[in-house]
Amino acid sequence: MAFSSPLFSPVNFTLNPNPQLNHPKSTKPNNRRNLTVCAIPPLSTATDISAVTGSLDGKTLAVLGGSSVAALAAILSLADPERRRQLQAEEVGGGDKEVVREYFNNNGFQRWKKIYGDTDDVNKVQLDIRLGHSKTVENVMKMLTEEGSLQGVTVCDAGCGTGCLSIPLAKEGAIVSASDISASMVAEAQKQAQEELFKSKDDQSLAPVMPKFEVKDLESLDGKYDTVVCLDVMIHYPQSKADGMIAHLASLAENRLILSFAPKTFYYDLLKRIGELFPGPSKATRAYLHAEADVERALQKAGWKIKKRGLIATQFYFAKLIEAVPA
């Protein structure tokens, strides 16, 4: 999502979660561990759509803020993003999953490889999204390491992309099983892991274990792991399917389940719809937002409860991050 203001304020992960206590300005003394991330900036001034529309897809959505939101909402009926998604699905002979697989094996792979990487060949929007995603990975690593060493801990990285999380997990000694629906992403993750984990040999330290990378969709995952992590993948699942997917991921985890998702609120839902008016030159996947209450309800139904929660947001990236444990 795009925002026009660069001002941010701290938000805390809460040990005894209550959605009403997640306001960035909350100062009630309670049992908190502070992990500073970026809170949502005010929607006050308009973003110049013409400057960013060439860089937007289902994840990088152009948005107008403030009074322009109300004005532009009236033109949503002039576009038909649903029809565009239907045509994409027909082209690849399937539904959302086939569109996602096709996208991230082709145009989407090239796009997100740059965003997840360290190349300078990115525009302002892509650079901002890289920052947001790196903050998510950083906070996940804090969640996982603050309670002890990861040496020998089994972790399932579901939807691993180019290995942004799998590689630092392996460096910490975790035994990582990583998967992605995109064969292109998996090949790139394997390449980067090989380069990063074994680029220098130090006899004084334990050699990291190479993550096991596989081409799999979430539905095909099996096994048992101490921790299951699924970052920025639920955006490809409608809530009706996300409930079952959350339950499936929870069934794979023994102690911890960490999820990130694009939160559904009135403003975000409206802004996403406006962003769909400007799909850019590359084909995009459909983006689904999720209400935190729906995610929490699905976890509770699976016998899990939220231990920590927080929001990470930059100008063009936002994600709700939660850690759940068995109830």
Image: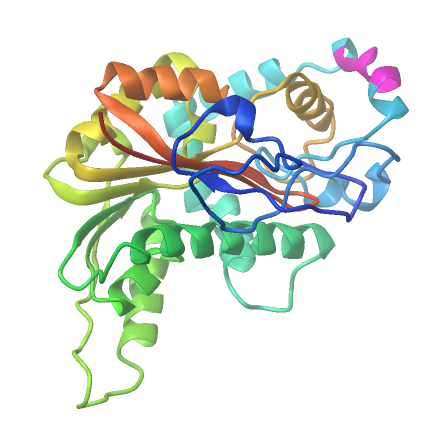
Q: Is residue 290 visible?
A: no
Q: Position of residue 280 (x, y in %)?
A: 70, 37
Among the 4 quarters of the image, the one containing residue 17? top left
Residue 148 lies, with reference to residue 49, above or below; the image says: below
Q: Position of residue 190 (x, y in %)?
A: 29, 62
Tell which residue pokes out farthest to the left in this image.
Answer: 223
Q: Which color scheme does this rendered protein use? A: rainbow
Q: For the magenta stretch, what is the residue range? A: 70-76
Among the 4 quarters of the image, the one containing residue 24? top right
Q: Nearer the viewer, residue 301 or 248?
A: 301
Disc tally is 0
Residue 165 lies, with reference to residue 207, above or below; the image says: above
Q: Position of residue 168 (x, y in %)?
A: 34, 64
- The N terminus - image quarter: top right
Residue 149 lies, with reference to residue 255, above or below; the image says: below
Residue 189 lies, with reference to residue 39, above or below; the image says: below
Residue 94 lies within the magenta run: no
Q: Nearer the viewer, residue 147 or 166?
A: 147
Please state if 75 lies on the left or on the right of 327 as rendered: right
- At 17% from the left and 77% from the top, the residue drawn is 207
Instruction: Name the magenta segment's main secondary structure.
Output: helix
Q: Nearer the viewer, residue 181 or 2?
A: 2
Q: Position of residue 179 (x, y in %)?
A: 26, 46
Among the 4 quarters of the image, the one containing residue 169? bottom left
Q: Is residue 71 visible?
A: yes
- At 68% from the left and 20% from the top, the residue drawn is 273
